[in-house]
Image: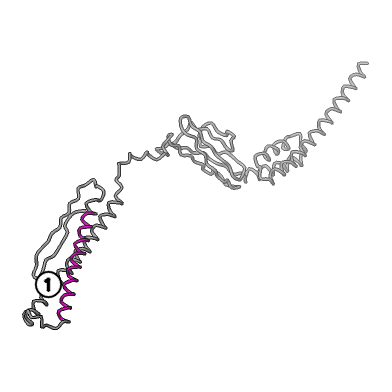
Amino acid sequence: MRRWLGVSWIVLVAVAAGEARADDKAACLAASEKAQQLRNAGKLSAARAELTVCGRPECPAVVRQDCATWMNEIIASSPSVVFDAKDGKGKDLVDVRVFVDDKQVADQIDGKPIQLDPGQHVFRFESTGLPPVEERVVIKQGEKNRIVSASFRPAGADRPPPPPPAAPVEDSSGRTVMTVASIGLIGIGAVGLGVGAVLGLQANSTINDLKSTCGVTQTCPQGDVDAAERKRNLAIGAAVAGGAFVAGGVVLFLLRPAAPKATAIRMEISPNPGGASLGLRGAF
C-alpha cells in the first residue's frame, strides 16, 4: 500500500509539473505576443513589462532569446527625460513632486533620467507653498535625457501690479471746441474789421477827391458818386459784421468750461499808418 501511494504521489507531481510547464509556456508565448503589440502601439513601458515575463528561465529558450533581443531594442529606442525645477530667482529646487499625465513619477528632483513612452505628455511640478507648474511636452522616440524644466513663481507674482488711483481728469473736449470756435470767430471778425477799415478809408478818400474836384454843387458824375457810396456802405457792413463776429467770439470764449489752469487772453489794438490792427494775445 505504501509503495502504491508513493508511486501515485510521484505520478501526480509529474502531472502537475507538466501542467505547470504547459501553463508557463502558454504565458510566455502570450507575453511575447502582447509585447510586440504594445511595442507597435508605442507603449514601450508596458512592452518592457511583458518582455520581462517572457524572459524568465522557465520560458522556452527560443522565446527567451527573442524577448531578450526585443528588450534591448526597446531600451535603445525608449526616450528619457530629466527633470529640473527653479525658483523665481533661478535657484535649483529639490523638494518637488513630479507627475506625468496625473501619475506621480518622482517625489523630488534628483537629476536621474526617467524613461517614458514617446508622444505628448503633461508634466506637473508641485512644491509646498508654491503654485503648481504644468508643461505640455512632446517626447520623441529615441530622445535621451530630454530636460523638462519648471520655473516656480510666488503666488501672485504673475499678476500685474494694480494701477495707481486715477487722478480726476477734466473733460476738456468741450472747452477745446469752444476755444477753437471762439478764436475762429474772433479771427473772422478781425478780418471783417480790417476789410471795413480799408474800404472805409478808400471810400472817404474817393469822396474827398470828388468834393475837391466837383465841388459841393453835385456836378460830379453820378456813377463816381454811386461807386463811392457803395464802397462806403460795404465798409460799414464789413465793420459791423466784423464787430459782431468779434463780440460773438469773445462771448463764446468767456462761456467755455473752466480749466484747471487759468487762461488769460487779451485783445490788443495797435495803430499803424493808414488804419489800425487788431490782435489777440493769450495762453491756452
**Label 1 sits on what residue type?**
Leu
Residue 177 or 69: which is nearer the viewer?
Answer: 177
> Would you say 84 lies left or right of 48 here?
left
Which residue corresponds to the image point at 12% horizontal and 72% vertical from the top-left?
Answer: 201
Residue farthest along the top direction in this orientation: 1
Rendering quarter of residue 90: top left
Residue 11 position in % (x across, y down):
88, 25
Which residue corresponds to the image point at 9% horizontal and 71% vertical from the top-left?
Answer: 274
Residue 128 position in % (x across, y down):
48, 29
In the image, the segment drawn in magenta is: 224-251
Residue 152 position in % (x across, y down):
45, 37
SS at circle 1: helix
- Label 1: few (<14), some or many (≥20) within 10 Å? some
In the image, residue 110 above or below residue 232: above
Q: How is the image coloured?
A: one colour
Residue 56 or 122: which is nearer the viewer?
Answer: 122
Magenta stretch, overall SS: helix
Rendering quarter of residue 281: bottom left
Residue 132 or 138: which is nearer the viewer?
Answer: 132
Which residue corresponds to the image point at 70% horizontal and 43% vertical from the top-left?
Answer: 38
Instruction: Quadrant for the N terminus, please.
Output: top right
In magenta stretch: residue 241: yes
Residue that mark 1 sits on: 201
Residue 66 position in % (x across, y down):
73, 43
Total marks shown come to 1
In magenta stretch: residue 233: yes
In the image, residue 165 above or below residue 141: above
In the image, residue 46 above or below residue 274: above
Which residue corresponds to the image point at 51% horizontal and 36% vertical from the top-left?
Answer: 125
